[in-house]
Amino acid sequence: MEVASKLNWNPLLADPSGRRQNKPRTLGKTMVIDKGLGLHAFEDLLETSSEHLDMIKIGFGTSPLYPLQILRKKIEMAHAYGVCIYPGGTFLEVAIVQGEVSSFFEMILNLGFTGLEISDGSIEMKRELRNELIERGLDEGLDVITEYGKKGWGSSIEIEELIETVMLDVEYGAQLVTIEARESGMGVGIFDEHGTCKDEELNQVLSAIPAQDILLWEAPLKSQQVHLLQVLGPDIHLGNIFPQEIISLEALRRGLRSDTLSFANARS
C-alpha cells in the first residue's frame, strides 16, 4: 500500500492538454443530470468521478419522488465530495405555476441543496420575477444557475433575447447561464432534429456574448461534446452529461481520446 500511495501518472500522460484546472475550478465545469440514480450508483459516480464533475442536477421535477431519506443522503454525499447539487429548473417552474415558491425554497434549503436553477423552458416568466428569484437564491446562499431557451421541439435561439437574458442574469448575480438542449440534445436550441450543431446559430451566440465562461452548454451526446470542444476549446462548461459518460468526457477535455488528441499536440 505504501508503494502504491506514491504512484502517480506523469502529468504529460494524465493531462496531455496541460490546461485542466483542479477543483474548485472556474473553467471547464461539468454538470451531470441525475434522472433517478439509486444510492449505490450515486456513490459509485462520486467515488470514481467527483474530481471531474462540478454540479449534479436532480433532473426536472424528480426531487419529490424520492423517499426523503434517500434524497437527503444523495445531497449529503454530494456535499462530502465537493459537488454542487440542485433540483432541475422545471421543478421551480412547477412551484411558480402552483403558487408554492416559498414552500419550494423552504424545502430545498431544509434538505441541503446548494444550488438553484432558474428556467422558463415550459412557462412564461416576467423579467421582474426572474430577477427576484435570482436575488432570493443568492440571499439564501445558493449557487444560482439560470437557463435560456424553451423546451418545445424545434425551438430556436433568439439572439437579441439571449443577449438581454444573459446580461441581466449575470448582472443580478447568476454564476452561469445554461443554453437549453434538454436531455435528448435534439430539435432544440443550437441542435437540429438529428442532434447536429447549427454552427451559424452557435457563431451568432459567440459573437454576441463577450465571455464564454458565463455560458454552460447542455450537450448530452458525445458528438455534440466533441464538436463544441473542438470549436470552443476544452475549457467550456458542459451540462446534461449522463453519469456513465463523465470519465469519457474528461478524457475528451484532456486530449486522451482520438477525437481531441490535437489538444495534446497544441501543447507541444
Image (spheres, rainbow, N blue to C red):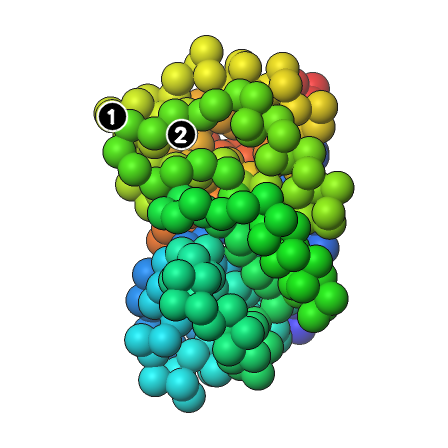
Between 87 and 50, the residue placed more toward the observer is: 87
Q: In the image, what residue occupies the spot 69% across and 34% down?
A: 167
**x and y percent of residue 51 in the render?**
59, 57
Please state if 151 lies on the left or on the right of 117 as rendered: left
Task: Residue at 48% x, 23% y: name it.
Answer: 158
Say which of 228 and 142 sits in front.
142
Q: Residue at x 46, y 17 (%)?
A: 201
What type is the residue that disc 1 sits on? Glu
Q: Quadrant of the N terminus?
A: bottom right
The answer to whether residue 23 is left or right of residue 105 is right
Q: Give the residue type at disc 2.
A: Gly
Q: Is residue 245 above or below residue 1?
A: above
Name the quarter where the C terminus is drawn: top right
Residue under circle 2?
A: 189
Q: Secondary structure at mark 2?
A: loop
Residue occupying image coordinates x 71% and y 28%: 211
| Residue ID for mark 1 | 193
Question: Within 10 Å of the Cα at label 1, are there few (<14), some (14-19), or many (20+) other Cα atoms?
Answer: few
Q: Secondary structure at mark 1?
A: loop
Q: Is residue 253 left or right of residue 74?
A: right
